[in-house]
């Protein structure tokens, strides 16, 4: 004998009306037969038998209102060997969520440090590779550093391939993939149609099947067409699959404001992607980091958003001439040491911050410039350590301020070094408008050396 | 519910085992179809019951009525071929050979679930069974499935990706972006449109300017055909033809499976957009399991044989429900696992 219970039409339904019985005592029913109708103020639904048997008793008459969910409404005399319906309801208990007295175990406690404290934290401290004494330094553009990184990784691993608009025959819209087609052929350097949503999805699917795609977006602005695949498919599937499906994939391309291209082609997405667990987000400044971090990103088993900058592609930097130059993801770099104020920046803004530091030095203020390099996981230890020394911080980013990278850094500094601060932190960022086209307005809108100097002086009360 | 072991084939002319003409399906195959389809139906009925009892939360989209598609296609799938679908996914998982206990325990959000309880009804996966989800965003699986096919071609492994989507997803832009690239690059993918005629509450007539969805590939030069998705033999035959096309390097193929879902879009859908008579008519005249039983009768399968299968399916589903009810909730420590993979270097 099994009880047939009053079902819920939705997770929020607590009671309803038993509108009608389609069966009576003594009727034989089989699985799938409609036996009753129930209704709430919102909906009516049929109740189907799950087991076969004979209706032994009707416990709640038709027309009864306010019948609580899970109340037995009928009894079913099972056939021989009939499996009993699941016993008394043992819905998941939610005490841990609602009852502060019953805190979840230590391991599950939400970590105020954010993803920096998640299990992804590596065992050994992250360090740039040591450059042996006497290593030759060579001059290379950021563009060629990125290209070399891809070429080296493609030589190393056949699973690595590049796809995107104009990456092959055209040699790259910004020539970042120059000569890759010639070396690797069209199996591994794939020109796509202009179809960001589609090819980002294809890339993630290929990654799920074990390949290691590099998906180039002609600019990150166009990747908004594809952001669903980046976040919902690439970033979340490892978690949703309980660790079964990995997406080792790099999404890369120029990010931020170029020059005079207007609002739709000039946006910094650092904060957007930096918010998403499951993604790593990298934004290098110089050639050595561009190369070392891109190689690390390609080898990383997780999806990596790699934010380049068009205005930096042609800039030359020294890079150590060593084999397999790899820079670890997740470690900021102190670009200039100083004792008076900490300035954080990433991507092209690092150059502005360094120039500002020179101007500040001329006025007797020694700024420490931290190149974030990785936005997620954010290396807040390096920042906090610096603020404990300088007691002041200015956060520079090319994107908008609200909910931005600087806002996040300030929050973490306040959490971890509140007592060390001698002045309220300041942020320098793009003005809170779509980027204007007019040359003068564009300059007014973007961060500048002058704005950084001004902010650094303000937190120094000078 | 391990499916019959199939030899891994590669390259052209894979032996799919269903080159027979219609109506001559062997007795054993018919019995397997029956068992697998009945398992899906009974499993889904039980899932509906557990939902009603509050043991399954959130969204729960049942596959009842569409069983012949997942089961018919499984008969022609070769080891290594991938399946990917949207959120009406339980039937595909069972057909692909996933353990019903793990599927049901995922529905109840328990540690024994196939995603450790972290995915839920819409997000289950089994690389072992070639099942790549279980995706909650309408249409996203079409691009992903095309990417699986890209990987097959890249690796030259001779496998085909079966990308399932509904009549609702057929109106998403990325479906056509994917069609274009799949044909352009001759990717081994079969697009499986499960046209159950309602995208949630919107009938296909109200949402599609061209309701014959198998024609949606014409402007990309992708062949397509309409199939009676309520006839498991018809599904397997068309599936074999489409898979052969894709596997032999000719590129994608579209199969529009005409089907019907008996239940609402999800559990909380009272399905007021269609009449009870319409649903009853389909149940009475087109039910895929009843249809199969007629063939079983003709094949002289005895009532006792079917009863034995009924009992076995009942036992499997009862065990799955019991497992899903008693498996513990995930350890709170699982909250922070599976967010990132540790880098190897």
Image (tube, grey):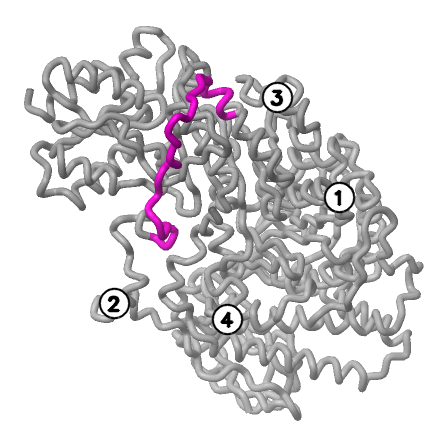
Q: Which residue is mark 2?
A: A103
**B250 with respect to B311 (left or right):** right
Q: What percent of the width, then of the height, locates residue A214?
A: 56, 34
Tag 4 secondary structure: loop
- Give the side of residue A130 with respect to residue A19, left or right: left
Is disc 4 on the same chain as disc 1? yes
Q: Residues within 10 Å of mark 3 (few under 14, many from 20)?
A: many
Q: Are marks 2 and 4 on the same chain?
A: no
Q: Chain of mark 2?
A: A
Magenta span covers which residues? A118-146
Residue in front for this viewpoint, B297 or A43: B297
Q: Chain of mark 3?
A: A
Q: Which mark is residue A166?
A: 3
| Disc 2 to disc 3, C-alpha distance | 54 Å
- Which residue is rendered at x = 64% and y = 43% of the image? B142
Dot placed on the residue nearer the N-terminal end, 1 or 4: 4
Q: Which residue is mark 1?
A: B156
Is label 1 in a helix, a strand or a loop? Answer: loop
Secondary structure of residue under mark 2: loop
**Position of residue B126 measured from the top left corner of the image (x, y, whole percent):** 61, 60
Please check whether the numbered discs 2 and 3 fall on a single chain.
yes
| Tags 1 and 3 touching, CB below 8 Å | no
Task: Give the spatial CA distance, label 2 vs label 4.
Answer: 23 Å
Tag 1, which chain? B
* N-term mark: 2 or 3: 2
Q: Is residue A448 magenta?
A: no
Q: Residues within 10 Å of mark 1 (few under 14, many from 20)?
A: few
Q: Residues within 10 Å of mark 4 (few under 14, many from 20)?
A: many
Q: Is residue A140 magenta?
A: yes
Question: Which residue is tagged 4?
Answer: B112
| Percent coordinates x, y for residue B169 in the rendering | 62, 44
Q: Residues within 10 Å of mark 2 (few under 14, many from 20)?
A: few
């Amino acid at each position: 004998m099994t009880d047939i219970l009053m079902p819920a039409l939705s997770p929020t339904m607590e009671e309803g009306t038993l509108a009608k019985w389609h069966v009576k005592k003594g009727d034989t029913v089989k699985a799938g037969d409609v036996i009753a109708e129930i209704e709430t103020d919102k909906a009516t639904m049929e109740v189907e038998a799950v087991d076969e048997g004979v209706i032994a008793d009707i416990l709640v008459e038709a027309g009864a209102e306010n019948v609580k969910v899970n109340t037995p409404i009928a009894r079913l005399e099972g056939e021989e060997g009939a499996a009993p319906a699941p016993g008394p309801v043992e819905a998941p208990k939610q005490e841990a969520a609602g009852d502060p007295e019953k805190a979840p175990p230590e391991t599950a406690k939400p970590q105020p440090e954010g993803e920096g404290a998640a299990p992804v934290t590596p065992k050994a401290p992250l360090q740039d590779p040591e450059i042996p004494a006497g290593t030759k330094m060579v001059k290379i553009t950021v563009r060629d550093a990125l290209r070399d990184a891809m070429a080296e990784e493609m030589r190393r691993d056949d699973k690595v391939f590049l796809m995107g608009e104009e990456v092959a025959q055209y040699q790259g819209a910004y020539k970042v993939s120059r000569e890759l087609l010639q070396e690797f052929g069209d199996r591994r350097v794939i020109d796509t149609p202009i179809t960001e949503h589609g090819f980002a999805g294809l890339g993630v699917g290929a990654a799920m099947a074990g390949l290691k795609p590099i998906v180039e977006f002609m600019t990150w602005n166009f990747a908004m067409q594809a952001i669903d695949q980046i976040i919902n498919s690439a970033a979340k599937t490892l978690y949703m699959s309980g660790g079964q499906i990995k997406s080792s994939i790099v999404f890369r391309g120029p990010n931020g404001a170029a020059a005079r291209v207007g609002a739709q082609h000039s946006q910094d997405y650092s904060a957007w992607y930096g918010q998403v667990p499951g993604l790593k987000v990298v934004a290098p400044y110089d050639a050595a980091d561009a190369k070392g971090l891109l190689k690390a990103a390609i080898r990383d088993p997780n999806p990596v958003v790699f934010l380049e900058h068009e205005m930096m592609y042609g800039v030359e930097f020294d890079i150590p001439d060593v084999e397999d130059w790899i820079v670890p993801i997740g470690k900021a770099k102190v670009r200039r040491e100083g004792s008076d104020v900490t300035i954080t920046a990433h991507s092209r803004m690092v150059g502005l911050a360094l120039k500002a530091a020179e101007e500040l030095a001329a006025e007797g203020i020694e700024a420490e410039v931290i190149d974030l390099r990785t936005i997620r996981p954010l290396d807040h230890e390096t920042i906090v350590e610096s603020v404990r020394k300088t007691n002041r911080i200015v956060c520079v980013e090319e994107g908008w301020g609200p909910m931005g990278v600087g806002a996040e850094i300030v929050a973490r500094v306040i959490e971890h070094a509140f007592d060390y601060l001698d002045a309220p932190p300041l942020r320098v960022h793009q003005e809170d408008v779509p980027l204007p086209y007019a040359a003068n307005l564009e300059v007014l809108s973007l961060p500048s050396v002058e704005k950084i100097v001004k902010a650094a002086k303000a937190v120094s009360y000078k | 519910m391990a499916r019959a072991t199939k030899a891994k084939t590669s390259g052209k002319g894979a032996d799919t085992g269903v080159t027979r003409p219609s109506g001559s399906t062997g007795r054993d195959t018919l019995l397997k179809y029956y068992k697998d389809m009945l398992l899906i139906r009974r499993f889904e009925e039980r899932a509906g019951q557990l939902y009603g009892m509050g043991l399954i939360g959130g969204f729960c989209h049942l596959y009842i009525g569409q069983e012949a598609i997942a089961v018919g296609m499984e008969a022609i799938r070769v080891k290594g071929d991938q399946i990917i679908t949207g959120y009406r996914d339980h039937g595909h998982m069972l057909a692909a050979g996933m353990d019903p206990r793990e599927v049901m325990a995922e529905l109840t959000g328990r540690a024994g679930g196939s995603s450790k309880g972290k995915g839920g009804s819409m997000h289950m996966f089994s690389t072992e069974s070639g099942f790549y989800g279980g995706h909650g965003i309408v249409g996203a699986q079409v691009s992903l499935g095309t990417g699986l096919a890209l990987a097959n071609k890249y690796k030259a492994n001779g496998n085909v990706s079966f990308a399932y989507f509904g009549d609702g997803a057929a109106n998403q832009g990325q479906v056509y972006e994917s069609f274009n690239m799949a044909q352009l690059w001759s990717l081994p993918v079969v697009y499986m449109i499960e046209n159950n005629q309602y995208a949630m509450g919107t009938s296909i007539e109200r949402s599609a300017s061209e309701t014959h969805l198998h024609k949606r590939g014409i402007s990309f030069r992708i062949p397509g055909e309409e199939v009676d998705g309520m006839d498991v033999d018809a599904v397997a035959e068309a599936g074999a033809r489409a898979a052969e096309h894709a596997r032999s390097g000719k590129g994608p193929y579209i199969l529009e499976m005409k089907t019907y879902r008996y239940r609402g879009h999800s559990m909380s859908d009272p399905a007021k957009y269609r009449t009870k008579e319409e649903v009853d008519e389909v149940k009475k005249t087109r039910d895929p399991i009843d249809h199969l039983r007629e063939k079983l009768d003709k094949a002289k399968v005895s009532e006792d044989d079917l009863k034995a299968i009924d009992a076995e399916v009942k036992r499997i589903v009862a065990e799955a429900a019991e497992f899903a009810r008693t498996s513990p909730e995930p350890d709170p420590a699982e909250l922070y696992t599976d967010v990132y993979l540790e880098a190897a270097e």
